[in-house]
Amino acid sequence: MLLRPTGIRHRQALILDALSKIGPTSQRHLAKQFDVSAGSMSSMTERLVALGFITQSTNPVNRRSDILDLTPDGRAVLEKVLIVWQEAAALITLALGDNQAETLTALSTKLRNTLGGTQPEKEQRGA
């Protein structure tokens, strides 16, 4: 709901954030990072391509795969998303206080890691 003014949803914002951190990468690699099928990732990225926030081009090294990358418009909307996320963090801190907000963050990170979640990583080319 907080992201509504950006025109994208939370999962799409996560994709933009991942691309900003790992750089241009294959759709297959991004799907693996999010632990979703290639088809699901394709559906999620189609709208971002249509909105002009990412590009999708044929991988020059492996023509059977695509490379996704942020566009300048994608970087601009990601800046808005990051502001929304900062505002949400501030609301959490206001509601819980500094110590409990830090505890919530630590517990959320532990839960993510325990359930197999990770931070997106750069693709290992040729591996």
Image (cartoon, rainbow, N blue to C red):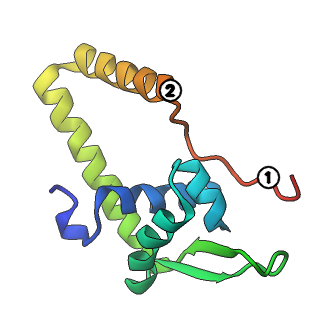
Question: Which amino acid is tagged 1?
Answer: Gln
What residue would you read off at disc 1? 124
> Which corner quadrant of the image does residue 64 belong to?
bottom right
Q: Quadrant of the N terminus?
A: bottom left
For the residues marked 1 and 2, what is the alpha-carbon distance in whole angstroms? Answer: 21 Å
Rendered residue at 55%/40% (across/down): 119
SS at badge 1: loop
Asked if one can make out residue 75 in the rendered structure from this viewpoint, the answer is: no
Front residue of this view, candidates 42 and 56: 42
Is residue 11 depicted above or below 97 in this figure? below
Earlier residue among tags 1 and 2: 2
Q: Which residue is mark 2?
A: 113
Q: Is residue 50 among the parts visible in the rendering?
A: yes
Check disc 2: other Cα within 10 Å, few if <14, some if 14-19, many if 20+. few
Residue 80, percent from left and from top: 31, 63
User: Where 97 sits versus 46, above or below?
Assistant: above
Amino acid found under the numbered disc labelled 2: Asn
